[in-house]
Image (cartoon, grey):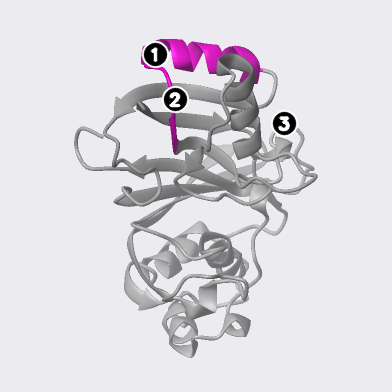
Amino acid sequence: MPRYKLTVEYDGSCFSGWQRQRNQISVQEALQQAVKTLFNEDVLVEGAGRTDTGVHALGQVAHMDLAAPLPPYRVRDGLNSHLRTRGVSILCVKNVPDDFHARFSAIGREYEYHIINRRAPVILEAHRAWHVIPDLDVEKMQRAARHFVGTYDFSSFRTAACQAASPIRTLDLFEIKSRDIPFGKHIIAHIASRSFLHNQVRIMMGTLKLVGEGRLEPDAIPSILEARDRTASGPTAPSQGLYLKNISYKEGL
């Protein structure tokens, strides 16, 4: 059976997350329903990352097998004809080897986190960013973020429900940039690693918000990591500011 790699964009506010769940609409279910309608096949669409409720994707990756070989463009365009009103877009479809797995073949993941920092309510980006009212010191947040880069035990930055066997992760990049917007600023964090713990990015961002507000010093991050205790870090940032930006694979996949 031919195997297809799908690159997927979606609006997380439309879904209960990636993973199929009973009595809730997930991205995985929307894709599988579209495949069933279009090709009359019951398939499992497996994703590279199980994004939570409200989390968006600019470049989620999934794979699936179909009984009949079809040109990738037909799969892409056919699925988009059923998904365009569901908050999902198939950006690309390509043929891949039978042993390709969207999750286990991945060698890197990149996330973005968006904050709108201003007093006035957020309208256009209401479901696309975290609205933070107190003025944030971006330079201090940048200094604090650098302490996360490297290999550490991130027990202080994962949810109690995290099922990962080990809390050890290596962050390759953690950059924070800011641009001026009317009466405020738009802050974007870019984080890259081979893999992440459950809610790791959101807890790190919640902690950096405390730094930006002056409630926590940038150099406090190492001691929080050393504590290996979730209660030592900051709150979990809201899901609507988080974007799964890109999944990396070996050349040719």
Residue drawn where x is 47% and y is 17% of the image? 76
Q: Quadrant of residue 180?
A: top right
Residue that carries the numbered disc 1 in the rendered image: 70
Residue holding disc 3 = 124
Query: Which amino acid lies under the numbered mark 3 shown in the image of this protein?
Result: Leu
Residue 115 shows in this picture: no
Is label 1 in a helix, a strand or a loop? loop
* Label 3 neighbour load within 10 Å: few <14, some 14-19, many 20+: few
Q: Position of residue 175 (x, y in %)?
A: 39, 54
N-terminal label among 3 and 1: 1
Identify the residue at the far left of this view. 251
Q: Is residue 25 left or right of residue 2?
A: right
What residue is disc 2 on? 66
What span is colored magenta in the figure? 62-84
Kindly identify which numbered label has been placed on residue 221: none
Judge whether residue 53 is colored magenta.
Answer: no
Q: Which type of secondary structure does the marked residue at label 3 adopt?
A: loop
Of residues 165 and 176, the one nearer the viewer is 165
Residue 11 visible in the current orientation: yes
Q: Quadrant of the C terminus?
A: top left
Judge left or right: residue 85 versus residue 111: right
Which residue of the protein is positioned furthest toward the bottom in this rendering?
227
In this rendering, would 100 be left or right of 17? left
